[in-house]
Image (cartoon, grey):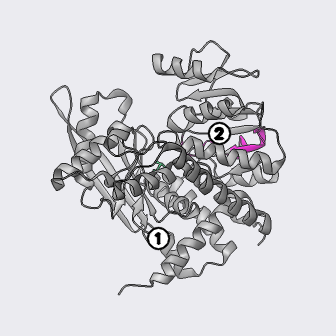
Amino acid sequence: MALDLSAVSSSENVWQMAQQQLDDVARLIGLNESMHGFLREPKRILEVSVPVRMDSGTTKIFKGFRVQHNMSRGPTKGGIRFHPDVTLDEVKALAMWMTWKCALVNIPFGGAKGGVICDPRTMSMQELENLTRRFTSEISIIIGPEKDIPAPDVYTTPQIMAWIMDTYSMQKGYSVPGVVTGKPVAIGGSLGRDKATARGCLYVVDEAMQTLGLTIEGARVAVQGFGNAGMYAAELMSQRGYSIVAVTDSKGGVANPKGLDVAGIMAHKAETGSVVGFTGGDRINNKDVLEYDCDVLVPAALEKVITKENAPRIRAKIVAEAANGPTMPDADVILFERGIMVLPDILANAGGVSVSYFEWVQDLQENFWEEDEINERLKRKMVRAFKETYDQAKRHSIDMRRGAYSVAVARVAEATKLRGLYP
Ligand code: GLU
């Protein structure tokens, strides 16, 4: 398998980008045409209109989506995103990425994703609850513990998962904790789920550092995004001995080549709502953080931030994609040529869905595990997925994304083939 650079073109649309990544790997692994065509499209798309009573007394109509990409390996799984820029194409891409992610870490799920076009930063708790409950009710025809299991994603929280669980349960007439993951522990959530995305990311970065012969102690890390993934990645990595030199959130951020006090930044964010204004460093914006001098770059915000324009200027040796889809296909080629190891999203952020799987298993069994057992199981999954990806990439002289994709897509194709075509 050789890298065909002519096949890689810039794609502005995130859904085209996801399809392009698949097309690329389909060629590499010699996927047959009908299987490729099958995997290239989502199985099911639901678009809903969500009327919400606002605090002002008026009713506002929001638009929401749930996309199920593939269910050959099990029920579909994936988060729900609340963001003003959500589009159907974005949700389709995110659903497809969930299919590959679940296959790569070898959990028995297919991929799905949901999204509502809204800005939760400008909504009250009551309005968010109304929105969540009505959206849940609208998509309840296709979700369920044996069908499709939502979870948190950008701007959705454990409290929002609790409302989803409650709404679905009220419709059924009994508690159904397994319908959603990322719930608070008090109602059937799993210990360790809150930090699982970040912890999984830490485990694969540790593996990459060791593989490349780099020293963890004092290695400099820049993080774009300070939500669930980015904030806990900064926290866990600094506890591990990495030096966090730059962090930003959607409003901007702070940088210091000598290292930042992550606990201080977390307290500042909890108090003011942003990392901006923290006094332990210089101001930095959301773009410059990507080019900051560091060993490990963790994009942990939104898609398409690493482009062919800034890829030549990225100084990290490892890029760990805590976000979904941060690197565009043409930027991938540049990073690979420059010898930068990209830990792709379907590997680097798969810790979240892995512990979601543990949560679902615990809910179905009504038997809950200790946190150290969960973290241990997570570590085994992540290390194995890293090794399988790395071996594949080395064997075929391809980048880590193609390595991960070829493992994952082959697993989904095998399951699809074994099940055969109905009727
Ligand atoms: N939204 C997360 C992701 O993109 C978690 C999904 C889940 O736990 O189901 O992987």
Q: Position of residue 7 (x, y in %)?
A: 69, 65
- Residue at the image position 77 percent from the left and 45 percent from the top: 209
Magenta-highlighted residues: 302-319
Q: State the quadrant of the C terminus.
A: bottom left
Along the viewing direction, whichever of 368 and 298 lies nearer the viewer? 368
Residue identifier under label 1: 73
How many numbered discs sit on the rendered protein?
Answer: 2
Q: Which amino acid does the dot numbered 2 rest on?
A: Val
Residue 42 sits above or below residue 217 on the image:
below
Q: Position of residue 66 (x, y in %)?
A: 35, 55
Q: Image quadrant of residue 59?
A: top left
Whether residue 411 appears in magenta in the rendering, the answer is no
Task: Please rate how many residues cluster around mark 1, counting C-alpha atoms within 10 Å: few if below 14, some from 14 to 19, many from 20.
Answer: many
Q: Image quadrant of residue 291?
A: top right
- Residue at the image position 61 percent from the left and 34 percent from the top: 236
Q: Secondary structure at mark 1?
A: loop
Label of residue 298 in the image? 2
| Foreground tag (1 vs 2) | 1
Residue 348 sits above or below residue 397 on the image:
above
